[in-house]
Image (cartoon, helix red, strand yellow):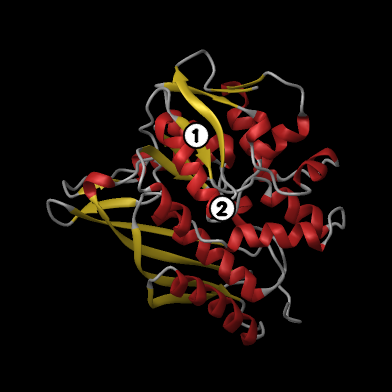
Amino acid sequence: MSNIELEVCGGCNAKIPQESLGETLSSIKNFKRDDVLIGYDTMDDSALVRIDKNNGIVTTLDFFPPMVSDPYTFGQIAAANALSDIYAMGADPICGLNIVLFPEDENIDILKKILQGGANKVIEAGASLVGGHSIHDPKIKYGLSVTGKVDIDKVWKNNTPNEKDLLILTKPLGVTLVTNAYGIDILGQKEMDKAISSMIFLNKYAKEILEKYRISSATDVTGFSFMGHLSEMLGDKYSAIIDSKNIPILDGAKKAASEFVFTKGGQRNRMHMENLVEFLLDDFALEEVLYDPQTSGGLLVSINKDDAKYALEELRKNKIEAKIVGQICKKYDKSIFVE
């Protein structure tokens, strides 16, 4: 780790709440072009623009304040998180633009390390950095605008699951609980290192495996939590039954929750979602994990039940900590049941 440290204050926990964002966007007039096939109206992970009959461009933007103290690691996490929106659409990244907010009187070596971390993740993704924009700001923030390409007929949308599909989650939950608990000495370096390893791991590798199978819907799990992003997938058409025993959870996350390491983002997610969820077991710590904002979280996919076993085997052979966490079912009075 570098001896230059960042002030830790965010990640995807810094997101504007789901309901506030929805209300704000719905109040804005928009012009709908025929070649813009997916915009922000469906809260999808990226926008989709038709280029020709078969090909589309996907574009996204993501940035936030640090959630770790090491600048290089922060750059890696922020870049992996931005690239994830491209993978969540079943697309391949082409290029990225840096987004930098940096204090005027801060040590420039910190910025160099952040950008090095981000650049190395973009290289790993097989994409090119092509520029960016920077301004002075009292708080450090960093991220990317990313452009990718996709076959329009194969694009993954975040709200098109099929009944009886199984749900696969490709990364463990609990990132914000672990990072916050580490910051107040409830958890140690071992738990923090596992959380960092999860955050810097590109969803590229899970996407390249899952695209071989029948995926009906996909998203990545970030600031709105597992519950929030699953709810977007279900919409008003379906419900989901979640198997609590199969949920992948980072070491220390449930301990942090049991020690009441709350986050504003987690509590906002709970308040937004709790009327749509029914827990059929008494496990407060698990609830907190499911509402925990994730930074650079895994892919959550709705997959044909006959494909799920084979996809899971391939994911795990490639050292991806994926689990089958539930099933899509017909619509009931609640959107999500956790048993």
Give the answer, above or below, for where 207 lies relative to 18.
below
Tell me the number on the disc at residue 320. 2
Q: Quadrant of residue 162?
A: top left
Tell me the number on the disc at residue 232. none
The answer to whether residue 56 is left or right of residue 300 is left
Tell me the number on the disc at residue 167. 1
The answer to whether residue 213 is left or right of residue 150 is right
Give the answer, above or below, for where 325 lies relative to 200.
above
Q: How many numbered circles are shown?
A: 2
Secondary structure under tag 2 reads: loop
Q: Amino acid at mark 2?
A: Ile
Residue 31 seen in this snapshot: no
Q: Amino acid at mark 1?
A: Leu
Secondary structure under tag 1 reads: strand
The structure residue drawn at horizontal position 55% and vertical position 47%, both measured from the top left corner, is 16
Q: Quadrant of the C terminus?
A: top right
Q: Gap between marks 1 and 2, in whole Å?
A: 15 Å
Q: Residues within 10 Å of mark 1 (few under 14, many from 20)?
A: many
Locate residue 141, reporting x and y percent.
Answer: 58, 67
